[in-house]
Image (cartoon, rainbow, N blue to C red):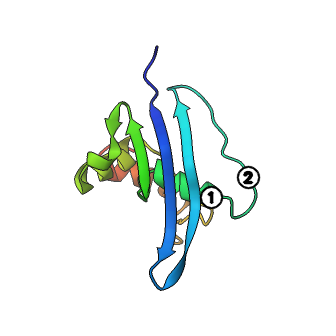
């Protein structure tokens, strides 16, 4: 059996607590994605899609559960290793795009390659 590229086991994410009410956004998500698979994360507004994508992209950490990327537990990675993973393994297209207003479309596309040290 192949090892999934992305393997989520019992992922939970909660916000608040203490003085504010605890909000459970993700409740025990299990998801396995193999290399080459195409996956769509769909759901109603407020259902946790963005939270899940932020965890998958290592922009946020789950409250509990296990996230394995290529068999390695993401929770054990330091900030430099996470930055490498975000730069080398993931690609992001945000809802707000986060483009550089003074740059052309080509310059905006080339920017991640420049930071990765890849010739444009």
Q: Position of residue 89 (x, y in %)?
A: 40, 40
Q: Is residue 82 left or right of residue 110?
A: left
Element at label 1: loop
Q: Is residue 73 left or right of residue 101?
A: left
37 lies above or below 66: above
Q: Residues within 10 Å of mark 2 (few under 14, many from 20)?
A: few
Quadrant assignment, res 70: top left
For this rendering, which residue is in front, 102 or 64?
64
Q: Residues within 10 Å of mark 1 (few under 14, many from 20)?
A: some
Q: Position of residue 38 (x, y in %)?
A: 62, 32
95 lies above or below 116: below
For marks 1 and 2 on the same chain, the one whose residue lies earlier in the sequence: 2
Q: Which residue is mark 1?
A: 48
Q: Position of residue 82 (x, y in %)?
A: 31, 50
Element at label 2: loop
Residue at horizontal 55%, vertical 37%?
Answer: 31
Do labels 1 and 2 touch, CB within 8 Å?
yes
Q: Which mark is residue 43?
A: 2
């Amino acid at each position: 059996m192949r090892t999934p590229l992305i393997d989520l086991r019992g992922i939970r994410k909660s916000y608040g607590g203490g003085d504010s009410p605890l909000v459970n956004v993700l409740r025990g998500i299990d998801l396995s994605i193999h290399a080459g698979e195409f996956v769509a994360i769909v759901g109603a507004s407020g259902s946790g899609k963005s939270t899940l994508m932020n965890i998958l992209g290592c922009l946020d950490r789950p409250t509990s559960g296990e996230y394995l990327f290529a068999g390695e537990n993401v929770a054990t990675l330091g900030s430099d290793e996470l930055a490498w993973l975000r730069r080398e393994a993931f690609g992001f297209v945000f809802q707000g795009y986060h483009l550089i207003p003074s740059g052309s479309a080509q310059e905006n596309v080339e920017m991640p390659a420049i930071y990765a040290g890849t010739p444009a």
